[in-house]
Image: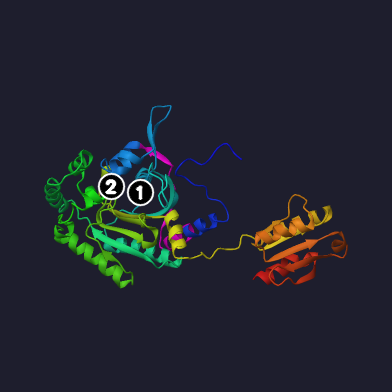
Amino acid sequence: MSTFKAPKGTYDLLPPDSAKFLAVREAIAAPLRSSGYGYIETPGFENVELFARGVGESTDIVTKEMYVFETKGGDRLALRPETTAPVLRAVLEANLHKTGNLPVKVWYSGSQYRYERPQKGRYRHFSQVGAEAIGAEDPALDAELIILADQAYRSLGLRNFRILLNSLGDKECRPVYRAALQDFLGGLDLDEDTRRRVDINPLRVLDDKRESVQKQLTGAPLLRDYLCDACKAYHEEVRELITAAGVSFEDDPKLVRGLDYYTRTTFEFVHDGLGSQSAVGGGGRYDGLSEMIGGPALPSVGWALGVDRTVLALEAEGIEPDLPSTTSVFAVPLGEEARRVLFAKITELRKVGIAADFAYGGKGLKGAMKNANRSGARYTIVAGERDLADGVVQLKDMESGEQTAIGVNEIVAELESRLG
């Protein structure tokens, strides 16, 4: 056994379970690819200030959860705790917003890192698929992203998830609400850290999960009562577009999400079968983030869906993703000549798109057939010296048990015909 183990709060993706994660990633990405979103990939670490400015000084992510380190050259970097800020940084750095084709629509898939207390559904290393539409202020764009996420989850067979929706206002109406909320929170019995948070970003207190805080928030002013006419109209159009698309949602006036950069539309996907870690993904509009990190005004919207938690949601509903067979044909050679001939045929099968594997290591017939069974292959090709002398191999249907002799030169065509 190895001396080393995976770090606390992390996990290894191993076959066959890893196939579920790949299927989830593909299902989430599929509707994005068909809706004009191009793939983007950013480094696993960025300048600390990118997250401090963009994610927010008052967030748990920045104050408690980031993995921060200093390079030999003296740079202070952080493993990315989220990917929206890095994606926007990359778009600005490459001047994609100056090409005249706005919004810039991109999607990503990758790992994030947060130093959290490990528990089921919450890890220190986790995987997300996300989408960002950068450079346009349009309710249809917000609606599009919510609809695409809903489409992705339904394509996996998920049904027991809910979409929570809210508006956080904008720079015109939020300051009035912020002042009212600070007045309310000022009269509560809060610890010193929470009071500091009230001064920096009081909306974050609404997101506090502690019961001692939540029970004091009864009667707190709600942002929806302070929205300006423009924000009300914007939010109503988002709601109408989603409804017209047949997507159900629940209005949640207390939904603020955990990042400081959100404005106007904010939403969350939750699954009631996951216990306390019920959020499987979420996102919203972040019209001021570009300016926070030194760019021009670029109204934008996006989301990130957790691959790990989506897999847990599938398990909670008893859903097995429709996974492609990893092996359709397994070759079992008996002798050196058969080894040479069948290896060449396996290579030919792979070239025409048939998933094929081979009995490596010189195993005998019994051991090799056990491997063939474990592989899940529909067909097994077996050949020995006598078969090759007759110019044939034995093709066995692993479901019916039927075995037939076919010509060596007919293997590829026969299997293409049988496997469709």
Q: What stretch is highlighted in magenta?
A: 25-47
User: For residue 190, which quarter of the picture?
Assistant: top left
Q: Is residue 401 above or below residue 258?
A: below
Residue type pointed to by label 2: Leu
Figure quadrant of the C terminus? bottom right
Nearest to N terminus: mark 2 or mark 1: 1
**SS at mark 1?**
helix
Which residue is under mark 2? Answer: 289
Q: Residues within 10 Å of mark 2 (few under 14, many from 20)?
A: many
In the image, 84 versus 308, the foreground residue is 308
Q: Can you give x and y, in whole percent of width and height, for residue 75 in the image?
A: 38, 30
In the image, 391 versus 387, the foreground residue is 387
Which residue is under mark 1? Answer: 84
**SS at mark 2?**
helix
Q: Can you give x and y, in whole percent of width and height, for residue 354 in the image?
A: 65, 62
Q: Is residue 210 magenta?
A: no
Q: In this view, does 240 lie above or below 181?
A: below
In the image, 198 versus 47, the foreground residue is 198
Q: Is residue 246 above or below residue 278?
A: below
Q: Can you give x and y, in whole percent of width and height, for residue 171 in the image?
A: 18, 51
Q: Is residue 108 above or below residue 381?
A: above
In the image, 32 versus 207, the foreground residue is 207
Q: Can you give x and y, in whole percent of width and height, for residue 207 in the image?
A: 26, 51
Question: Do the residues bearing badges 2 and 1 touch, measured as CB atoms within 8 Å?
Answer: yes
Figure quadrant of the N terminus? top right
* Residue in the image at 83% along x and 52% along y: 336
